[in-house]
Amino acid sequence: MPSPLSSSPLTRLGALALLGGIAAPASADFLEDSSARLESRTFYFNRDFRDGSSSNPQGASKREETAQGFILNLQSGYTEGTVGIGVDALAMLGVKLDSSPADSNSGLLPSSGHDPRHSEDQYAKAGVTGKLRVSHTQFKYGAMLPDMPLLKYNDGRLLPNMFHGAQLTSEEIAHLKLTATRLERYTARDSTDAQDVRLNCKNKRYACDTTGNRFDSYQADYQVNDQLLLQYAQGGLENVYRQRYVGIVGKQAVGAGKVTADLRWFDSDDAGSARAGEIDNRALSLLLSYAQGGHVFSAGWQRMNGDTSMPYLDGSNPYLANYVQVNDFANAQERSWQLRYDFDLRSVGVPGLSFMTRYVNGDHIALANGDEGKEWERDVEFKYVVQAGTFKDLNLRLRNATYRTNYEQSARDVDEVRLIASYNFSVF
């Protein structure tokens, strides 16, 4: 199916940027500011649902697969002149290492078109981005990995989700960054096909496959000083939901350490023809942290108000303090809190090794049958970066999660292990 962007003026402008990047004389900045990075990522994923089997309504009791991924990120500089032109590109390849029909569909690999219980042996996806720069303003059109409060791309499996559209960023005013984004397609983490942007339907909160014509976001970031950042954004998925965001991040030295406060507020409701039905949510979350030496102690608080859960795009991570490895704690009327501890063992003479653990507890969830839902999650992560020798900079991670809930009609208990080995090669 052709992309809905194929005949738009933005498409033509993006194509001109691409052609210009190829045809324009290569300036020193275009070449010297260019880079190519290849990431190799080996991923083992095991999610035990603690119930069910391949033959009952709950579905398979386990998801377990291993795969090898490669992510090539090419970024050019800009040509000389008043209007600088450049080209970026993303190319990704996933290869199956181990999978069985009973334990497939982990999100690492796409399902076979002939049998959804079998995973494909390999898959690939790619995207090109044309870009223009005038002064401190730049325009990009094509494939991108957006990282914004209203839309943060998901990178929790073998390959990240990739979105397709246009973005205009301006930093003409000191300390102020303005961003306008329009996205109409996305390629899921375990897919090769671009699809219409759609609403996430985790735990069947909303009807699945609810698409919108486009996703828009308008954002302002004002860096007051080194200690204070103010953010405002608004946008949403056309004919599905609209959303506003206010964020405040403050940092302050206290004694020998530093305190950080991160406050996030979202206001969401249905929009246009309301294809997903009623949406009514206000989400407030706060994360307070104190760092000293190699230790960081954090506490989070999150509250959902309104009749529905917080909406966000499929393929994205909700920008919430209590969004963690398995769960987002964003159900209707849910109240949750978090305790977290991070330790960098460099401070005790073990450079490269770090540790994190956290616990999140949520309750007061408004279930469809009138009951009150409860849930909790405990996460542990060990990370080691090789410091010297042949494998210097090899990144090894062990991530473990335990999730429990009392409303198993839509969510399931989970024990999860992820083992990730990644290495970044600088091509040039």
Image (cartoon, grey):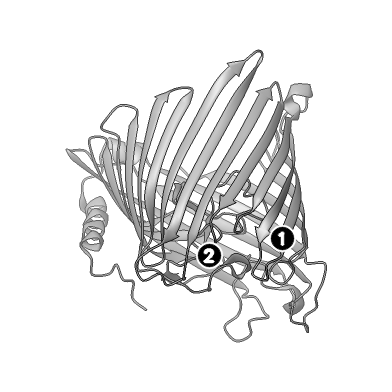
Asked whether residue 312 is in view, the answer is: no
Q: Where residue 35 appears, x then y in whole percent?
A: 42, 43
**Mark sitting earlier along the chain (1/2):** 2
Amino acid carrying label 2: it is Asn
Q: Where residue 30 appears, x then y in whole percent?
A: 30, 41
Question: Quick one: SS at disc 1?
Answer: strand
352 or 238: nearer the eye? 238
Position of residue 271 relative to residue 229, above or below, is below
Name the front one of labels 1 and 2: 1
Quadrant into which the N terminus falls: bottom left
Q: In this rendering, would 130 be left or right of 403?
A: left
233 or 49: nearer the eye? 233
Q: Where residue 360 appears, x then y in whole percent?
A: 72, 46
Residue at (71% x, 65% y) in the render: 371
Q: In this rendering, would 199 be left or right of 34?
A: right
401 or 277: nearer the eye? 277
Residue at (18% x, 38% y) in the render: 81
Per the model, the C-alpha gap separating discs 1 and 2 is: 20 Å
Q: In this rendering, would 271 be left or right of 55?
A: left
Amino acid carrying label 1: it is Gly
Q: How crowded is mark 2: few (under 14 residues within 10 Å), some or many (20 or more)?
A: many
**Res. 200 mark:** 2
- Residue at label 1? 373
